[in-house]
């Protein structure tokens, strides 16, 4: 068991509000929270300065590609989790599109085993269909028995409407959530970027917003039909936000996430044909960015999820239309989000709400109170940071934010009572 | 000029400079000994990751007439087939001491990427995906100017598969920069998704547009586009957008008909029409050499 800890001089901010308080952690749980509780800490406790900082429940990422097994040259559970911890995350949901994919107990157990040694809690998502091939249901019950709570064929959507309907019906009885990557494969076929003015000028094949929106609309109808829980991954268009807004006002049990890059970048970033800016779904237009931000502010978008998608340098050194889509996200997400969103709302959308969607609450994202699991981040809202790809903890370098300077950054991260990041340095 | 990646790198002044220099070089092609020592000691590589006959031959002829050494690289005979990346290929070839690389690739943007990977080589876009084919547009302008005296004020009709055409994108930029007005005529399924920012009009009735046109630029309809994916049949395409013998009679007698080649006679242009004096396809090919000589000369500075 790790040393007791004292987080001294900060303000605590959780779903219950904001107050000046020290936090004492021992045995993996919060022992005391209050203005002057530091003196209650054991004398051998490690003291972490939180002056000028906000102590909050750790961030929870619903959408991280950790690439292991199969693509260890791009990322491993260990390096991905280290990136997450540096970014202020205390838990991540590992996406199942590994090689082989997480479509059976053996692969899920392997990722869970790797995750048990990682710096943050690693929850595993399973696939909806065997091999992510969209043909037969994966053994969701067998995976749910191992604790898997989210199922997705992410990287692609389930194209067959009848199969998706059956998956939703089946999932309902298990109490798990299906998460859809909404993209009609035929409409998006060959699309290397958002279809619009930029793609037309650049001569790159585009994927229209309609490729996403038609599947969002179909799946809302299926959620209505089945009553099952459905989560929309990385929504990227104004039309998708409107569809989900209506579905929620109707009372359907749907949730949605957006990725940081879709909230600050547009398709104009592709003008230099740099595959770093190629991502799926693609960067859209100014109007889409505005509507996503509005949806985030009014709660149509429940969560910000990174879609952290590492790729080895040689994979991104290809012609734009041949390069794989994806961007790093875990280390930059919080600073990017704080560039346009207040800290309270940012934490709501990056910690406690996603923790509930992932089925990890209140162990993750729960209020910072006596007896709570000690999964915390300490954010310095005034720290400035310039992104240097070479210094990221990820094995890959494909960040679209190279050279950007941000204000507001994670300083310390506490996972299960252990200080895994101190002063923006990983401790192991 | 650092590189020639897009017609927009040139601007009006740059285009006019290329055309002016090309005029001087056109004369070289009429001499008994068609060679000048201008680029002696310079090395130019043609890197064609996508098959092309005329563009490659035209660039290589241009380089040789300028006395440059030419290295010819094609994918069929190369290490690309063994899995080498474009970047490694480019770096390897530059390391052999090249001064300019002419790059053709099926993917849009590859010449732009190559320009970031080279250390000191000049990069010429020899056609990239659906993006641009700047030297084709320059030789079209050169040819039209040769016939009509000037480009300013001309009405240019670009007909056919604009969506998949790198030629059309370069032509729109070049003709517009030189003061012509451009109208696109194409089925909706072969127009780009958005024409926002394009200085063009769009027409859908070729019969109505032809009598007003000073220049008709026909684009090749690739056979695979006629398989029902973009137009129902080639026959229907020809009926609506082909320059048939009947339609050729609607043309102004002074109109100029261009085609980037290779022509598919009977689809976008009737065989008889291709042989009319208004069709300047062969002259385009001849002028292509002079225009590419001008581009190489302006990039490599001429000093050996």
Image: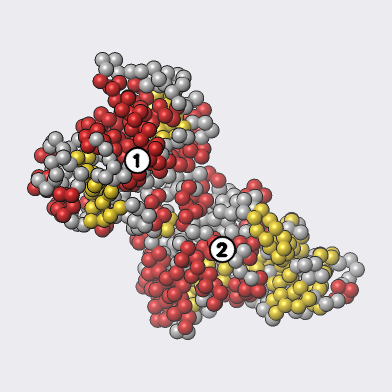
Check the residue under mark 1 and report the chain it is in. B
In the rendered image, the quadrant that contains the N terminus of chain A is: bottom right
Q: Is residue B243 visible?
A: yes
Q: Residue furthest right?
A: A43
Give the percent coordinates (x, y) of residue B119. 53, 33
- Residue A94 lies in what quarter of the image? bottom right
Give the percent coordinates (x, y) of residue B240. 16, 54
Q: CA distance from mark 2 to mark 1?
A: 36 Å
Quick check: B265 above or below B58? below
Q: Residue at x 62, y 54 (%)?
A: A404
Check the residue under mark 2 and report the chain it is in. A
Mark 1: secondary structure: loop
Disc assigned to residue A260: 2
- Residue A167 lies in what quarter of the image? bottom left
Q: Is residue B69 visible?
A: no
Task: Give the labeled residue for mark 1.
Answer: B133
Disc assigned to residue A300: none
């Amino acid at each position: 068991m790790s040393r007791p800890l004292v987080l001294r001089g900060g303000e605590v901010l959780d779903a219950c509000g904001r107050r000046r308080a020290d936090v004492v952690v021992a045995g993996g749980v919060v022992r005391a929270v209050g203005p002057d509780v530091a003196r209650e800490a054991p004398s051998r406790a490690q003291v972490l300065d939180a002056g000028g900082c906000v102590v909050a429940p750790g961030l929870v990422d619903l959408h991280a590609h950790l690439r292991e097994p199969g693509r260890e040259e791009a990322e491993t559970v260990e390096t991905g989790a280290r990136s997450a911890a540096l970014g202020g995350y205390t838990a991540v949901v590992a996406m199942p599109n590994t090689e082989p994919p997480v479509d059976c107990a053996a692969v899920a157990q392997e990722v869970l085993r790797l995750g048990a040694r990682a710096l943050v809690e690693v929850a595993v998502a399973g696939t909806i269909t065997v091999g992510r091939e969209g043909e037969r249901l994966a053994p969701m019950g067998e995976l749910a028995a191992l604790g898997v709570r989210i199922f997705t064929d992410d990287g692609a959507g389930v194209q067959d409407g009848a199969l998706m309907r059956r998956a939703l019906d089946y999932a309902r009885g298990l109490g798990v959530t299906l998460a859809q990557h909404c993209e009609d494969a035929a409409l998006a076929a060959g699309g290397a970027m958002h279809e619009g003015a930029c793609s037309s000028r650049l001569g790159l094949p585009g994927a229209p917003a309609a490729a996403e929106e038609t599947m969002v609309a179909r799946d809302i109808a299926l959620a209505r039909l089945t009553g099952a829980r459905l989560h929309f991954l990385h929504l990227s268009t104004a039309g998708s936000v409107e569809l989900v807004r209506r579905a929620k006002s109707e009372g359907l049990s749907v949730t949605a996430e957006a990725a940081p890059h879709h909230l600050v970048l547009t398709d104009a970033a592709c003008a230099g044909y740099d595959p770093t800016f190629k991502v799926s779904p693609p960067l859209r237009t100014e109007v889409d960015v505005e509507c996503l931000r509005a949806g985030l502010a009014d709660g149509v978008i429940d969560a910000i999820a990174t879609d952290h998608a590492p790729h080895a340098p040689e994979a991104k050194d290809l012609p734009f239309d041949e390069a794989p889509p994806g961007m790093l996200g875990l280390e930059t997400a919080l600073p990017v989000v704080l560039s346009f969103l207040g800290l309270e709302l940012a934490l709501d959308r990056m910690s406690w709400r996603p923790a509930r969607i992932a089925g990890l609450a209140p162990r993750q994202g729960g209020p910072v109170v006596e007896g709570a699991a000690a999964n915390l981040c300490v954010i310095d809202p005034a720290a400035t940071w310039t992104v240097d790809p070479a210094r990221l903890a990820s094995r890959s370098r494909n960040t679209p934010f190279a050279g950007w300077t941000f204000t507001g950054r994670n300083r310390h991260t506490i996972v299960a009572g252990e200080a895994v990041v101190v002063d923006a340095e990983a401790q192991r | 000029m650092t590189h020639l990646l897009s017609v927009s790198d040139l601007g009006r002044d740059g285009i006019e400079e290329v055309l002016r220099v090309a005029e001087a070089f056109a004369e070289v092609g009429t001499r008994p000994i068609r060679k000048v020592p201008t680029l002696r000691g310079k090395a130019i590589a043609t890197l064609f990751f996508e098959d092309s006959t005329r563009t490659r031959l035209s660039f290589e002829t241009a380089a040789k007439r300028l006395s440059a050494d030419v290295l010819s690289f094609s994918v069929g005979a190369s290490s690309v087939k063994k899995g080498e990346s474009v970047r490694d290929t480019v770096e390897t070839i530059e390391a052999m001491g090249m001064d300019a690389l002419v790059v053709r690739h099926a993917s849009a943007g590859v010449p732009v990427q190559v320009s970031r990977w080279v250390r000191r080589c000049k990069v010429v876009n020899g056609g990239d995906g659906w993006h641009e084919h700047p030297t084709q547009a320059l030789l079209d302008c050169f040819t039209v100017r040769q016939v009509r005296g000037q480009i300013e004020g001309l009405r240019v009709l670009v007909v056919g598969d604009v969506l998949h055409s790198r030629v059309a994108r370069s032509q729109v930029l070049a003709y517009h920069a030189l003061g012509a007005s451009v109208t696109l005529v194409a089925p909706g399924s072969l127009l780009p998704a958005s024409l926002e920012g394009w200085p063009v009009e769009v027409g859908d009735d070729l019969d109505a547009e032809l009598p007003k046109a000073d220049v008709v630029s026909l684009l090749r309809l690739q056979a695979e586009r006629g398989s029902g994916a973009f137009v129902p049949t080639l026959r229907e395409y020809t009926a609506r957008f082909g320059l048939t013998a009947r339609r050729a009679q609607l043309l102004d007698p002074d109109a100029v008909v261009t085609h980037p080649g290779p022509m598919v006679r009977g689809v976008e242009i009737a065989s008889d029409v291709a042989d009319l004096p208004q069709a300047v396809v062969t002259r385009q090919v001849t002028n292509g050499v002079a225009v590419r000589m001008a581009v190489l000369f302006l990039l490599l500075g001429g000093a050996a």
